[in-house]
Image (cartoon, rainbow, N blue to C red):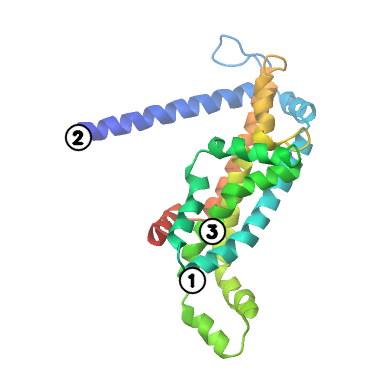
Amino acid sequence: MRPAAWLTWGALAFFLLNLVGVVGAVLVNSFSTQWFGTWWPNGLTTAWYAEAWREYNLFDVLLVTLQVSVAVVVISVLIGVPTAYALARRDFPGKKLLNLLFLLPILMPPMTYGIPLATVLYKFHLAGSMTGVIVANLVPSVPFVVLTMTPFIEQIDTKIESAARMCGARTSAVLTRILAPLLIPGILAASILVLVRTVGMFELTFLTAGPDSETLVVSLFYSVSAAGIRAQQTVDAMAVIYTASMLVLLVIALRFVNPTQLVTRLKEHD
């Protein structure tokens, strides 16, 4: 094996070892009764999870997270799929520029446009509410659905639509009865990816959330900020809950989405 290969595998092993160590330390500390200066805690307990659930009102936080995520997914699909259909089936002046504009919210760091967006939402009294959080998360989510669904639609032969129209089907019937069943895998993939993205989106949610519209990731940030006031084990317990929820969503996403195929489709579209 070449020295470059040894260096690569060594760097990968070092990264994985540090990752497992950090995650493992947080996981163990979330169950520890007391852990100072030893390799293992003095005892283990699940009481910190119950305290974190009660102290951080995690039921309400998880409910808000679910409501925001589902709303963002539904609205993004309702707007993004028809837009993707128009981009896939029509050629018009400025189409490449429009595709570039859809890419910007995905490629740019959310904080760069999040602050001006939050300013606008506060001006119209939308920030600080669940509506403001949903609107802010739609900015990167709708383009993500558009860019994900456009290659799926392009793969469907236009002759199928032409045959349906020749048989007397209207445009609405073509979309709902012909295209919709064929697009279900793509819509499902885009929905799951948007769901994962929304649950993990911190910047936009943090800038627009209020006391009653905090998602799990924002609530975790506030709990970390209050680590000196509350027991560190409760903060770690909340971090474990957040990590576990993200892992579940990622497992579900990988069940329906092949990342290699998705990247290939996007490259073919570009």
Q: Measure the C-alpha gap from mark 3 to mark 2.
A: 44 Å
Q: Are marks 3 and 2 in contact (CB under 8 Å)?
A: no
Residue occupied by mark 2? 2
Disc on the earlier residue, 1 or 3: 1
Give left or right: position of 145 versus 258. right
Q: Which residue is mark 3?
A: 146
Judged by depth in the image, the label closer to the viewer, 1 or 3, is 1
Name which residue type carries label 1: Arg
Judged from the image, the secondary structure of the residue bearing numbered disc 3 is: helix
Residue 112 rendering spot, x and y as whole percentages: 53, 36
Percent x, y of residue 200: 60, 40
In this view, 159 is above or below 82: below
Q: Residues within 10 Å of mark 2 (few under 14, many from 20)?
A: few
Residue 245 appears in the picture as rendered? no
Q: Give how far apart the Cα atoms at labels 1 and 3 are.
A: 14 Å
- The x and y percentages for residue 101 are 49, 52
Circle on res. 90:
1
Indicate which label's residue lies in the foreground, 1 or 2: 1
Is 208 placed above or below 155 here?
above
Image quarter of the N terminus: top left
Quadrant housing residue 9 = top left
